[in-house]
Structure formats: C-alpha cells, structure tokens
Amino acid sequence: MAIARNPHVVLDCPDTTLLAEFYGALLGWAPKLDPDGSWATVSDGQRHLHFQRVDDYRPPQWPGQELPQQFHLDFDVDDLDEGEAGALGLGATKHPHQPGTTFRVYLDPAGHPFCLCQA
C-alpha cells in the first residue's frame, strides 16, 4: 500500500505570476494566482505545477554545476518545430547546449531547464 499519492511539482522562482502564465499557456491549463504573489498553480484537475516565490532566487546553470539543476521537466509534443515556435513565443529561450535529436532543451522565464520531446 502506498504511503502517499498525487505528487505535486513545486518550482522556486522570483515571479510566480510570470511562470504560472508561461506554463499555463504551454500546457493549456488555467493559472490560479495567490493575491500576494507568493504562490501560483496551474492544473488540469489531476496534474499540478506550483510556483513559489523565493527572494534572491538564482536559476540553475545547466549543464555546469556551479548552480546545478535539481530536476527538469519534460513535455511531449507532436512536432518539435511547432512546439519550439510555441514555447519561444511564450517567452522560453532555447538553450545553446542541445545534446539530443529527439528532444530540445529550453529555459523558462525564470531560467529552469525543460525539454520538449518528440512524442
């Protein structure tokens, strides 16, 4: 029997509204914003991404290890070129290090690495 269920991912960031709007648009999920800006969520009703404001936030520096990433998010897309155009249009940045051919690495507006993967 499992002890826990329904894991939720929480990303630290300097601006919860910016990231909730970015990931909400990327996934087609509506953002829910706390009035004080300390917390935000996007969800489809079953899966959730949360964002918490952290003062003096410093983004990870991948692939280097001076400020190592703790994890990254992968998202499936039907077409890498279309997915890339959409993500860049929302404010993502294409990372200069692209180690594969079936996925592409980007940075969200707070500097977290994420990948779009060919489904």
Image (tube, grey):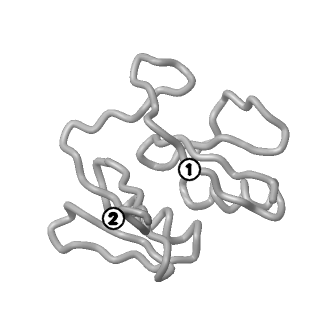
Tell me if 33 is positioned left or right of 108 in this view.
left
Q: Residue furthest front?
A: 1
Residue 63 place in picture, x, y as percent: 57, 24
Q: Nearer the viewer, residue 5 or 100?
A: 5
Q: Nearer the viewer, residue 77 or 1?
A: 1
Looking at the image, residue 5 lies above or below residue 56: below
> What is the three-letter code of the residue carrying label 2?
Thr
Looking at the image, residue 20 lies above or below residue 109: below
Q: Earlier in the sequence, mark 2 or mark 1?
A: 2
Crowd band around label 1 with a 10 angstrom C-alpha radius: few (<14), some (14–19), many (20+)? few
> What kind of element bears circle 1?
strand
Q: Residue at x 74, y 51 (%)?
A: 117
Looking at the image, residue 67 lies above or below residue 71: above
> What kind of element bears circle 2?
helix
Give the residue at mark 2: 17
Q: Are marks 2 and 1 in contact (CB under 8 Å)?
A: no
Q: Residue at x 42, y 62 (%)?
A: 7
Tell me if 40 is positioned left or right of 20 in this view.
left
Give the residue at mark 1: 73
> What is the three-letter code of the residue carrying label 1?
Leu
Residue 19 place in picture, x, y as percent: 41, 59
Tell me if 19 is positioned left or right of 56 in this view.
right
- The part of the image, by quadrant, that contains residue 59 is top left
2 or 1: mark nearer the eye: 1
Tell me if 104 is positioned left or right of 59 in this view.
right
Q: Residue at x 82, y 64 (%)?
A: 78
- The part of the image, by quadrant, that contains residue 35 is bottom left
Q: Residue at x 46, y 82 (%)?
A: 45
Quadrant including the N terminus: bottom left
Quadrant including the C terminus: bottom right
